Image (cartoon, rainbow, N blue to C red):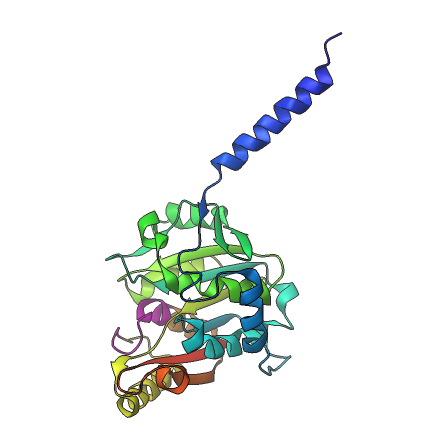
Amino acid sequence: MFDYTYQIISISFVVIREMEVCMKYRTAAVAGSFYPATADQIDQELSVFLNAPSESTTQAKALIVPHAGYCYSGAVAGYAYSYLKNIAHNINRVILLGPSHRVALQGCAISSCDFFTTPIGPIPVDKSAYTQLLDEKLVTINDQAHLLEHSLEVQLPFLQRSLQNFVLVPIVVGQCSVQHVSQILEILKVNEPGTLVVVSSDLSHYHPYQEAQLLDNRTIQHILNYEDHLSGQGACGCYAVNGLLSYAKKQHWPIKLLKKANSGDTFGSKKEVVGYASFILY
């Protein structure tokens, strides 16, 4: 007698395997350079960075964090991510915005991938959010913009170790208006519970130490004042930061500077430094 049960099980395995093959993964591009190459090494570093004190009553709605190599800016970023430890169970979606370093980009770009991976593992992408943004013509699909982009990738291990189960909406932000980014946040209803916005941005680049401190302090004050006209000279993620500040001002989100430093304070020369700062909006 023909074993239909065996046939059904066999077909099911084939279907599942084909579905897995059809899934697209954006693989880690800067593991081993910007941050450690293995999950154990990542955990070892992040255990230090994520051990900063935090205010348990602060319910983060958004973070602004730097994106250099962990040896340079990891402590500044980690200080902000430490604020998630007491609310991790409430966050199930992360809107991640960062600048394009390798592709000349107009507007905002999403990826066709279903998962973004790090040595820790894969993170599922919220495809329904992508559909909303595509329907509104606020983004385009551009895998090249995501392929080697580190500004988003370096945030992923922090998110994986700070949160529990979450889906990701990774967006590379090129040249665009304040209103464009603000509209993305409005369409995605980031003010509703369960969503965290993370904007990835460093501050000034390659100035002498004391000059950089003056420039960065000025940029920090602009951010604290919700001034949405930052330029790339003050913050490399200026377009995303400007859009977030515009949106946050309308929503009456308070903003607080958490930590600041530059590469001369951490691991680099003081002749040409890169500035870093982290903020929480709540």
Residue 68 belongs to magenta span: no
Which residues are the magenta region?
231-243
Q: Nearer the viewer, residue 179 or 281?
A: 281
Q: Nearer the viewer, residue 112 or 62?
A: 112
Could you say which quadrant of the image residue 173 lies in? bottom left
Q: Nearer the viewer, residue 53 or 186?
A: 53
Residue at 29% x, 86% y is: 212
Could you say which quadrant of the image residue 2 lies in? top right
**Residue 60 visible in the shown view:** no
166 left or right, relative to 264 = right
Q: Where 117 sits versus 212, above or below?
A: above
261 left or right, relative to 189 = left
Q: Where 145 sits versus 36, above or below?
A: above
- Outermost residue toward the top in this view: 1
Residue at 54% x, 72% y is: 45
Residue at 29% x, 57% y is: 107
The quarter of the image holding the N terminus is: top right
Position of residue 147 measured from the top left corner of the image (x, y, whole percent): 36, 52
**Residue 160 visible in the shown view:** yes
Q: Where 12 sits versus 43, above or below?
A: above
Position of residue 230 measured from the top left corner of the image (x, y, whole percent): 29, 76
